Each structure stands twice: as structure tokens, then as C-alpha cells.
Image: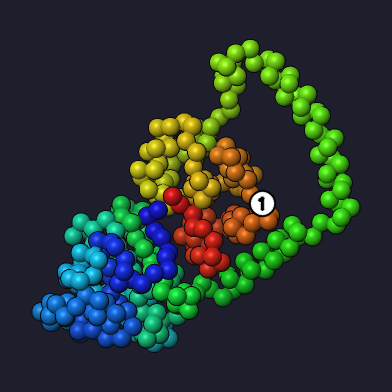
Amino acid sequence: MPLQIVRNDITKMKVDAIVNAANSSLLGGGGVDGSIHRAAGPQLLAECRTLGGCETGDAKITKGYNLPCRYVIHAVGPQWRGGGHGEREKLVSCYRRSLALAKEHHCETVAFPLISSGIYGYPKDQALKVAIDTISDFLLENDMLVYIVIFDRKAYQIGEKLFSDIAAYIDDNYVEAHTDSYSAQLSRMKMLSQEAPAQVSYAMSAAAKAKSLDDALSQIDESFSEMLLRKIDEKGMTDAQCYKKANIDRKLFSKIRSDRLYKPSKPTAIAFAIALELPLEETRDLLQKAGFALSRSNKFDIIIEYFIERGDYNIFEINEALFAFDQSLLGA
């Protein structure tokens, strides 16, 4: 998955580079900055002294020393002053400069904190959106695994209205799925018992028609892989456009393309439905090819339905919401 949101201590991330939310002196400070300097050891400070500081919105790179990463990228984010002093542009620049340095030094994996969202006061929901938007734009053109590292729940926040809307949608639909009356349950059980003999009869008839294993196999319907590739062509997309929009690694997509019987995980299958911007019924059809379904008794599924019904197919925004509700993220 090219972009992941994880809970961890960034100083323990085993990646090529971690990004430090630094101050302009680059000589250490509080929060993430202080933690990184303590974990890296005094050699990091010694190298930082040679860099001559750093402008807001820019970034500089050093070795990782005692950290489990090769590099530390020191990005200087803006202090929040109400939003009318170019804060967003400077924060976007932090992420772009950091990613450019990572690419320049051939990093394949990079971990970011939420820059400026601590003592610099940048509102956490807005800081998260800037991070997601800027990193996802970069990943549409570049191959890299990027982590946004959240230390604890307090350090993570999606928009209050979005959170409330999703929570209400879950409540309306999730509760509904569990409030069948006793008579409704009996009615459904009766219907299933009536259908069972017909299903058995149909199955026996179908088996009789399959004179050999080859005949039976020839009746197999379109597979997940075949349907996915057909949908990509129908949408006029390239393979790369599709798997990048789906937050899927190129190597995994190659496996799916080369194996017509490949069985993806449910988050992977849904990720492709989101990338293809399929409506709900077509999403269900694609999932069925992989052996899955959407259920009103599953919060993950209800959140997916919430976004599809509203025509919101930004997979990174969907993953923000899934993370906020402690659900699996979309992608590989």
C-alpha cells in the first residue's frame, strides 16, 4: 500500500528515511523533534550544526545515526497564525521538499509525522488533509511507500462534521441491521427453508449437465481479475492510473493481471472499486467475483457505502475515515 496511516513511535520506524518536524535552527526542540534527536544520539546534532538552519517550508537531510533509518529529513513547518498568512502553502512545501529529498536519495520508504500539528498549533484535521493531499499527489507520479505516523489518538483528527456524519450514518444503518422483530426472523427462516429444495433440485440438474470436469470448468463465470481488467478498459484508464488510484502496489497488480483466478483481500477488491468509481451495485458485483459482499452488520462496509453513495471516491480521504473508526484501510 503506497500510503499508510499507522500508530507508532516514528523513532522506531524501520524505513529508509523519517521526517523530523524541526524548527528553523535544526538544533532540536520539543515534541517529535526532541524525540528524534534523543534517539539518534549527539552525532545528529553535530551534523545539524553544519547545515546553517533551514527556512520555513523547506527541508534538509542528514544521516540517521542511531535510528533504524538511513536518513532524517528535517522539515520546518509553519506556525499557525489563523490561516491567512500562507500557512497552507508553506506546509505543502514542507511535504513536497521532503519527498523530493527522499526521491533524490533513492528512498523507497519514508515516514512522516503530522508536521506543524503539535506546538506550532496547525489544526490537526487541516494538517492531516494537507499531508494526505500532498503525499497522494506525489504518489500518482512516483513509486514510494509513505507512512503517516500517528503517535496516539489525540494526535489524529478528521473533520468534526465528517466524523459526526459518518457516525450518524453508521448508527442509522448498523442498528437497523440488528433490530429485526422475532416475526421477521421467522418469516425469513421460512422463506429460506422453502427455497432450499428448489436450490438442491437446481444443483442436481446442473451437475447432471456437467458430463465431465472440463464441461463444468467451461461454465465458470468471469473471474475477479477478468472483470477488473475489463472495467479498467471500459473506463479508459491505464493500469498504472488504476492501481495508483487504488493505493495498490505495482507488484500486486502484476500478480492480479497475470493470474485470472487471483483472489484479493476484501480491502484490495474494494480499493479497485473505488479507483474505478463504481456505483454501489457494480461494487457489489466486483466484490462477489472475489467471494465477498457488503454487509449492514459491518462498520467497515457501512463506511464504504457512505462514501460511494455520496460519490466521494478519494481513497485517501476514505482511509482517513476508516482509520478514525479503527477499521482496516483500503489497498493491498
* 277 lies left or right of 145: right
Q: How many marks?
A: 1
Question: Circle 1 is placed at which residue position?
Answer: 295
Left or right placement of residue 101 versus residue 292 in this view:
left
Expressed as whole percent of the image width and height from the top left, the position of residue 147 reads: 36, 63
Q: Is residue 219 above or below residue 166?
A: above
In terms of depth relative to the viewer, which is nearer, 100 or 216? 216
> Measuring 20% from the left and 81% from the top, which residue is drawn there?
26
- Helix, strand, or loop for circle 1? loop
Q: Is residue 32 visible?
A: yes
Can you say whether 71 is above or below 88 in the image? above
Residue 306, can we see it? no
Q: Amino acid at mark 1?
A: Ser
Residue at x 34% of width, y 60% of height: 146
- Quarter of the rendering containing residue 120: bottom left
The image position of residue 214, as x and y in percent, is: 55, 15
| Residue at 12% across, 80% down | 46
**Residue for point 71% across, 60% down:** 173
